[in-house]
Image: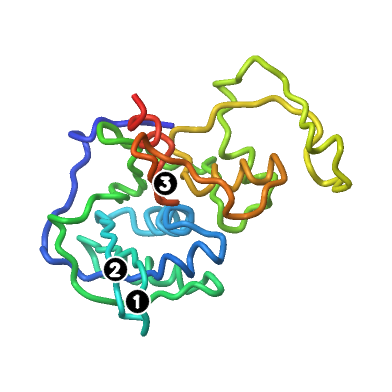
Amino acid sequence: MTERNVREIDFLRKPDPAPSVEIDVDSLETAGFDVDDVLRPALRRFAEKYPQLNATIYLYNSPSVNFGNESWSAFLGVCGNEKVLHAVRDAFSACTGVRSQFSDYIPLRSAYARFHIENGGLWQIIDDASWGLVSDEEHCHAGMSAQEDLEAALDDDEPLEDDWDSEVSENSEDASLPRRGRLRAARSDASVGTIRETIEQLFGLPPGSVALCGPDKRPLRADATIATLRRRWE
């Protein structure tokens, strides 16, 4: 992945506040998606189709009652051409069971940049200091098989030396569980939600039983990156 220092990204910061698309996070997680995995393929296609347009997509998380009940919402604000806002809305509208809508204007000072479209390319935050260019080879959770998702979340360049045998799998009647494999480190740009689901799949654990937490023992949100998780433990 091509990387840039955050100072090399020409973020758009006006207007403030900015129009947004609101997503009900509970419905998103229930449907098995997270924010990054839905947006990444949609915005990459948009960037390729409209190479002349630049935009920055900001994420702002807040409690909300806009869907008729108290819930936690992700607000995606767009600074740039209005077509990008509609592309964001269309991406989530295509996800069955996910509640989304055009919503309130959000204060960009309280949000943080999540994606950036520039010169036909899509850039995604890796950590506080760096951003990565999303390439054609980047695999996305939405629309992938479980095996493809697992392979995409693991980093071939960072193998762990020990083979492992799953005692649970060997003794289990479920033949679909893995019997032997090689553990690999999670990619820095993989989402916490994807890695959490990967662990559950590998070890045959119930959905929702795995939590990836910071030193404060609080679980990270599904749309946080593994780089963020590692940085908190450094």
Residue bearing the label numbered 2? 63
**Cα distance, mark 3 to mark 2?**
17 Å
Residue at the spot 43% in from the left edge and 37% down from the top edge = 226
Q: Quadrant of residue 77?
A: bottom left
Task: Pick whichever, 36 or 175, lies toward us.
Answer: 175
Q: In the image, is residue 50 above or below residue 233?
A: below
| Local crowd size for mark 2, using a 10 Å CA cut-off: few (<14), some (14–19), many (≥20) | few
Q: Quadrant of residue 233?
A: top left
Residue type, numbered disc 3: Pro
Q: Position of residue 101 (x, y in %)?
A: 36, 77
Q: Is residue 54 visible?
A: no
Residue bearing the label numbered 1? 70
**Quadrant (top left/top right/bottom left/bottom right) for the N terminus:** top left
Q: Position of residue 182 (x, y in %)?
A: 70, 25
In the rendered structure, which disc, 3 or 1, sits on the residue that comes first in sequence?
1
Task: Pick whichever, 71 or 23, lies toward us.
Answer: 71
Q: In the image, is residue 169 above or below residue 44?
A: above
* Contact, mark 3 vs mark 2 (Cβ under 8 Å): no
**Cα distance, mark 2 to mark 1?**
7 Å
Residue at the spot 66% in from the left edge and 45% down from the top edge = 148
Q: In the image, is residue 212 above or below residue 60?
A: above
Residue type, numbered disc 2: Pro
Label 2 sits on a secondary structure element that is: strand
Residue type, numbered disc 1: Glu
* Contact, mark 2 vs mark 1 (Cβ under 8 Å): yes
Query: Residue extending furthest top?
Result: 161
Residue bearing the label numbered 3? 219
**Cα distance, mark 3 to mark 1?**
21 Å
Residue at the spot 40% in from the left edge and 74% down from the top edge = 100
| Local crowd size for mark 3, using a 10 Å CA cut-off: few (<14), some (14–19), many (≥20) | some
Q: Position of residue 2 (x, y in %)?
A: 39, 31
Horizontally, residue 122 falls left or right of residue 60, namely right
